[in-house]
Amino acid sequence: MIDLSSVTKSFGTNAVLRGVDLTIDSGTSMVIIGGSGTGKSVLLKCILGLVTPDAGTITLDGQDVTTQDRDAFLARFGMLFQGGALFDSLPVWQNVAFRLLRGSLKRPAAEARAIAIEKLRRVGLKPEVADLFPAELSGGMQKRVGLARAIAAEPEIIFFDEPTTGLDPIMAGVINELIREIVTEMGATAMTITHDMSSVRAIADNVAMLHDGVIKWTGPVDRMDNSGDPYLDQFIHGRAEGPIEAVR
């Protein structure tokens, strides 16, 4: 469904992506792993068209992402942001229904609210949460609201940016289970970027290791522990010694 070929991106003298090749099949869950500052978020932004690659091609269903109608293209995506990215001035239901209240996906307010409440229920939140404001919610509840918003418009593709950052291990496990269940139910194509190995094992069908601007290894998650790749092996076991230099 998504194909990247020789994608490069530099910011000044900093070459972040140095020739990324990656294929994400329809209906599968791909998790991109790698250390902080390795270009995972830049890669995601390139796919969404928020950052323009310097070279290479990115296609969605065989069509170049840079030539597609932007509204129709973005309508196919849902996104769970790392920090939640909820609007403080809007009640929860309007956060969830944000895309349904404006633009090409606009619905009547009553219908949008009903959809929002149903999506909140799907992520384990009660209807009374709908009229609260984000500041009145715990971190785990805010993350659930972000997940409800990501699925509100029934997207074909969902991106998850560090979905368990800032959560305790139990809530992280809950979010991982929700993500896996929802992606499977919707038949969606998913791409997650994370360095949390518990998330990788819970969410992934396939894994790709991004390091030094290139994909060092990619394959099914059940082959990850016996990949034979020294970069992947060092990363998943958290070893200080190996080909990846630890910043001291």
Image (cartoon, rainbow, N blue to C red):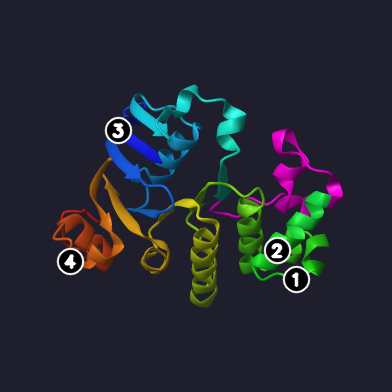
Q: Which residue is at the far bottom?
A: 170
Which residue is under mark 2?
A: 120
> How many neighbours does mark 4 have within 10 angstroms: few (below 14), some (14-19), or many (20 or more)?
few
| Dot 4 amino acid type | Asn
Magenta range is 81-110
Q: Is residue 118 magenta?
A: no
Which residue is under mark 3?
A: 5
Task: Give how far apart the Cα atoms at labels 3 and 2 are.
Answer: 38 Å
> How many neighbours does mark 2 have within 10 angstroms: few (below 14), some (14-19), or many (20 or more)?
many
Give the residue drawn at x 40%, y 54%. 28
Q: Is residue 72 left or right of residue 127?
A: left
Q: Is residue 69 left or right of residue 241?
A: right
Q: Which residue is at the far top?
A: 67
Whether pointer 4 and pointer 2 mark residues with C-beta atoms closer than 8 Å, the reply is: no
> How many neighbours does mark 1 have within 10 angstroms: few (below 14), some (14-19), or many (20 or more)?
few
Which element carries disc 1, helix, strand or loop?
A: loop
Give the residue drawn at x 38%, y 61%. 204
Which residue is under mark 1?
A: 126
| Dot 3 amino acid type | Ser
Percent x, y of residue 182: 55, 62
Give the residue drawn at x 44%, y 42%. 44
Residue 248 in sight: no
Which element carries disc 4, helix, strand or loop?
A: helix
Q: Is residue 99 magenta?
A: yes
Whether pointer 3 and pointer 2 mark residues with C-beta atoms closer than 8 Å, the reply is: no
Task: Give how far apart the Cα atoms at labels 3 and 4 are.
Answer: 26 Å
Whether pointer 3 and pointer 1 mark residues with C-beta atoms closer than 8 Å, the reply is: no
